Image (tube, grey):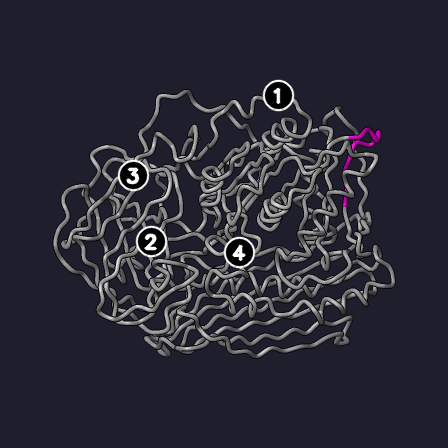
Amino acid sequence: MDQVRTNLHEVTEARHVEITLPDGCVLAARIWRPADGTPVPAILEYLPYRKGDGTLARDAVRAPHIAAHGYAYVRVDLRGTGESEGLMEDEYTAQELQDGCDVIAWIAAQDWCDGNVGMVGISWGGFNGLQIAALQPPALKAVVSIASTDDRYADDVHYMGGTMVIDQISWASNMFAINTLPPDPDLVGDKWREMWLERLRGSGLWLRKWLEHQRRDAFWKHGSVCEDISRIEVPVYAVSGWADGYCRTVFRLMESLKGPKKGLVGPWSHKYPHIGVPGPAIDWAAEELRWWDQWLKGIETGIMDEPQLRLYMQDHAEPASYYAHREGRWIEEPSWPSPNVARSPFALGADGTLGQGGAQDGSLSIRSPLGTGLAGGKWCSYAKPGDQPVDQRRDDAGSLVFQTAPLEAPLEIAGDANLELSFSVDQPVAQVAARLVDVAPDGAATRVSYGLLNLTHRDSHETPEALVPGEVYKATVPFKHVAQTFRAGHRLRLSVSTSYFPIAWPAPEPVTLSLDTAASRLVLPLRQPSDDPAPREFGPPKGGAPAEMDRLAPAKADWVVTENLASGETRVTITDDEGRLRIKDSGMETGGCGVETYSFSGTDWRSFRGHVVWDLDMSRGDWRMSSRTETEVTATATHFIVKAKLVAREGDTIAHEESWDCEIPRDLA
């Protein structure tokens, strides 16, 4: 990344600033702002990931660069995280959102702020930016929301199409570990241990809460701004990537928001666009500053004169578990839905064909083996080796497959495909996974998009209904949005399976799904290439100097699938070893390693298991803490079974130890 020095403003950094809320709780902030004290607009990023270590590398590149352009960049730890007092018991609580409103009021009242505040964030910070905007704090004037959602049930790490996403186990285990970390004693003083013990004893087991809400109830409606999108009146710039788990949100926001809005979707995974992988990464700082200058400084930057939505039209890529770069080009759409996109049906043939001709009468059935889905990668890619889908031919062997003839000319899609099904099943609870695949002339099969649906949720995520075996139903499976070119000579393939592990937890029993091909169809969003001029270039990434850190041990990521032919066990082992770092400005050393294991045995539908262990530690001089968290999920036909354990140590002495063992009824899941 290019480092840029600007003479606009010299920047001062306050490493630890305390913000006292109306109830007396003190939140911790790190603030970068112009050194001359001139009142400027402020940009708030509000997260639980620890300003002193967890987000420091990212903040160091972003925050001083933006501050040098005449802004105060305020990075605040949520209540109960980092150096902030209090307790965090779940994500996006009413307390968190009220605290955010109070922080905005505090920022606006500072003599270095001109009273105008924006919110920016990726993932958690993108969520609460939208949620706080819906509460309408007076000083909040604009939002940039990256990799977020307007609907916590439809598009988050918990459920997809009413199926339980395995990333829910992964993410809950990650937060379980993060919640064991203490504040920095050098910054908060002697009260650090009391604050730490409060977290250890009170944060709880979030996975149990999330599993207790398997349908779209009030728990998930809270914080889902789609419940009343009219509450968001400030301008919103929504951003995501095709490899991210949250790209659908950008399109829904472009449809539903009534105020000023912009959308951007690149090829990226769950990352800021300036460090976007797969590339190309872009000069996101320049684009973001155009947005802030427009809405926080009142400068006409021309950003609102450009088309509403910019998308990266991906070209074909050979199947791989990691992409450093995706070939393609940027396109623009004036609005969404776009006049350039037409929804076109493709018939499913009883002979396995897929085409735009007439439907064929016939019925086809599938009962997928347990291993269907092993080539699927992760629900939300972080651009780590192994977490993107590999060649689909193995998964397709356990699926119904429908395929076009080789294309005579290139074909483009932009938007969300849908699979309209007429079906019956032999169990009261069933799921379907549908994948759109690009098949090269040599047979290599690259997944382009996919969708999941718990078929008991066919009519409603709020009031699912059990299926009657043998009865014929209709359902629509929504796919993730994508923009993709299919080359001439390639084929489009639709693959349909009854399981997709380890992306989704399987149904309680093995299911046979029967499709009426004449009454089923795939609907694709075909895009007509336009003759519009090429969009304005973004340019290469720019930012500030990296944070000064010494790497004491290397980071490592791995994704291994093993099949023991003797025992029949299949195991997916995902390692996320963060290595070890020393942060120069604080002298703090941090290390962490997580190992996730997802497994099953032979044809035993009761053998599915998820198991995650995280080891974290922090040290400085003679002070040292460490923690181990362990989570295991199994299931019977009627219950999810969760076992978890936490052990935290100060030095070699156990500071807190706790275990959980709970059974949660399956609610048509």
Read off the magenta span.
30-39
Identify the residue at horizontal 78%, vertical 66% (top origin).
Answer: 624
Figure disc tally:
4
Residue shown at the point (56%, 25%) measured from the top left: 303
Q: Quick check: 171 above or below 254?
A: below
What's the amino acid at mark 2? Answer: Val
Find disc 1 in the rendering and name its residue.
300
Which residue lies under the disc numbered 2?
477
Of callouts 4 and 3, which one flags the residue occurring earlier in the amino acid sequence?
Answer: 4
Rendered residue at 52%/71% (across/down) = 611
* Mark 4 touches mark 3? (CB < 8 Å): no
Q: Residue at x 51, y 68 (%)?
A: 211
Distance Cα–Cα, label 2 vs label 1: 42 Å
Q: Secondary structure at mark 2?
A: strand
The answer to which of marks 3 and 1 sits earlier in the sequence is 1
- Amino acid type of disc 4? Lys
Q: Is residue 332 visible?
A: no
C-alpha distance separating marks 3 and 2? 15 Å
Left or right position of 283 against 268: right
Towards the viewer: 201 or 106? 106
In the drawing, what numbered circle is on residue 343?
3
Looking at the image, which is closer to me, 388 or 202?
202
- Quadrant where the image shows the C terminus: bottom left
Q: Which residue is mark 4?
A: 221
Q: Secondary structure at mark 3?
A: strand
Marked residue nearer the N-terminal end (2 or 1): 1
